[in-house]
Amino acid sequence: MNRQLHSPPMIELIKVSKQYPPDVVALKEVSLSIATGEMFFVIGRSGAGKTTLLKLICSMETPSNGLIEIAGQPIHQLKGRHRAKLRQRIGVAYQDFKLLIDRTTAENIAISMEVSYKKPQLIRKRVRSLLEQLDLADKHDSITGELSRGEQQRVTLARAIANSPAIILVDEPTGNLDAATTERVMNLLHKCNKSGATVVIATHDDSIYRDTSHRVLELRTGRLVNPVEEVSG
Ligand SMILES: Nc1ncnc2c1ncn2[C@@H]1O[C@H](COP(=O)(O)OP(=O)(O)O)[C@@H](O)[C@H]1O
Ligand SMILES: [Mg+2]
């Protein structure tokens, strides 16, 4: 029954280090294996390396050392079309949003589905459903640059998951949200996970991982510290 025990890892890091010029060591020999269909929390203080870890996994940054495999493929060694194809299977909700701020909420969310040639009717339905679940139904036609930070954050999440990617990476998804909205966001992420997505959440908001049954790993100045996860089992 337990899919996680039988599938190869979806995300594998082997002794991955990342140094930013001139001499910032953001990650130091991080080894980590995340199973297909797992939900996984990366925690740690500001500056610990959480965002860097997510950027390496989605190949937005290149590791200085070590190997990263996504679905068994060395994503950083892949070229052009092959890398792009793998990259399309990863949805990322960035900490700094990266929305098209002069476009509407609906347009921003639709983008990931349009690039994979989904039918317009399907896209419209999915966008409305996501907006509803995130309590943003009335923001469908709002220009995202005019939304509050908490609203932009949820649009970013909706865009990341719209196309039902195999891997979902979310960076501080609840940083600007009240408790009720945080719960909505987490419900949606759990739903994605239950549908089979591998979900990695970087956060310093302990309210979202305090009582979780999923794995929680802590980064401290770029190193993974003793697994907290065994405690919560
Ligand atoms: N593009 C960059 N250039 C130089 N240093 C960076 C860059 N991005 C992050 N850092 C540094 O790397 C370290 C880890 O940052 P980050 O991964 O953003 O941590 P977190 O997300 O846990 O707050 C910090 O010391 C940060 O200042
Ligand atoms: Mg960060």
Image (cartoon, rainbow, N blue to C red):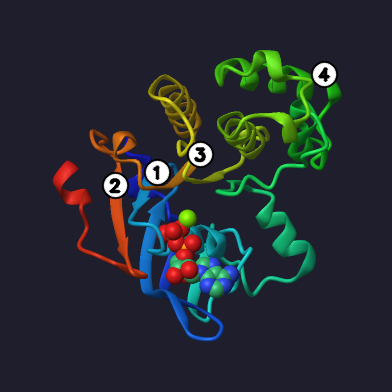
Query: Farthest residue toward the left?
Result: 231
Quarter in which the N terminus is drawn: top left
* Numbered circles on residues, count: 4
Residue at the spot of label 3:
197
- Marked residue nearer the N-terminal end (2 or 3): 3
Residue 115 is left or right of residue 93, and the answer is right
Give the residue number, with chain letter if any, for mark 2.
Answer: 215
Asked if residue 32 is positioned above or below residue 15 in the image, the reply reads above
For label 3, the crowd category at 10 Å Cα-Cα, with few meaning under 14, some 14 to 19 and many 20 or more, is many
Whole-percent x, y for residue 173 in the image: 49, 39
- Residue sitting at x 41%, y 63%: 47
Q: Residues within 10 Å of mark 2 (few under 14, many from 20)?
A: many
From the viewer's side, name the closer residue of 34 and 181: 181
Does residue 109 show up?
no
**Kind of residue at disc 1:** Glu
Mark 1 near mark 2, Cβ–Cβ under 8 Å? yes
Spatial CA distance of label 1 from label 2 is 9 Å
Label 4 residue near ligand 2, CB within 8 Å = no
Which residue sits at x=32%, y=48%?
A: 5
* C-alpha span from label 4 to label 1: 31 Å
Circle 1 residue: 38
Q: Amino acid at mark 2?
A: Arg
Name the side, left or right, on which 195 lies relative to 208. Answer: right
Q: Which residue is mark 4?
A: 121
- The amino acid at mark 4 is Gln
